Amino acid sequence: MKIAAVTISDRASDGTYEDKSGPAILAYLENAVTSPWEPIHKIIPDGIESVSATLKQLADEEGVDLILTTGGTGPSPRDLTPEAMELVMEKELLGFGELMRQLSLKEVPTAILSRQTAGIRDKSLIINLPGKPASIKTCLDAVFQAVPYCLDLIGAGRIETDPNAIVAFRPKAK
């Protein structure tokens, strides 16, 4: 099982500021995932080309099962992660973005500006998260229950979770 955290930020990629979002994703996963997994962490600049090329490489060449991006989902001119996702994903999973925004709105009114989404490329699940570490936790808490079963359905690696951190939902066999 390979899981990637991809920080999408011009300033983090050029060293202007420290990336705290990618490490926040990896820390969340260390706490929640109990099955063996290999972490991959990348920091890339904003932009359709950089994001789409990285997502394709991770999914197609590296066989990453779960790709969690952070950043580039707002309304500013350089926030182009959703546009890059459109070029990469084969199926969009709109419910992820809807739920993340809904729960984030309880914490900050500007969550309505977020355009995060999720989708599938072959056997990779890609989820776009906001750029702030606190918002990352809020969003992962919201959607991660469904992630293991989604990975099962698309033929990706299997994730088991620590029920003290997050209870993964899988339908019971009949």
Image (cartoon, grey):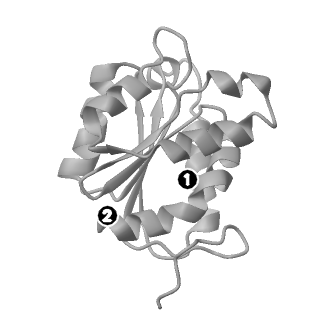
**Residue type, mark 1 in image:** Leu
> Relative to 144, is 115 above or below?
above
Res. 66 in view? yes
Q: Secondary structure at mark 2?
A: helix
Which residue position is annotated with label 1? 26
**Residue type, mark 2 in image:** Ile
* Residue reaching furthest to the front: 174
Point out residue 64 in the picture as x, y percentages from the top left corner. 31, 56
Q: Secondary structure at mark 1?
A: helix
Point out residue 149 in the picture as x, y percentages from the top left corner. 46, 69
Mark number displayed over residue 153: none
Cα separation, mark 1 vs mark 2, equals: 23 Å
The answer to whether the residues at label 1 and label 2 have Cβ atoms under 8 Å apart is no
Number of marks drawn: 2
Q: Nearer the viewer, residue 119 or 124?
A: 119
Q: Which sits earlier in the primary sequence, circle 1 or circle 2?
A: 1
Point out residue 109 in the picture as x, y percentages from the top left corner. 78, 24
Which residue position is annotated with label 2? 154
In this image, 10 relative to 139: left or right? left
* Identity of the residue drawn at 46% across and 72% down: 159
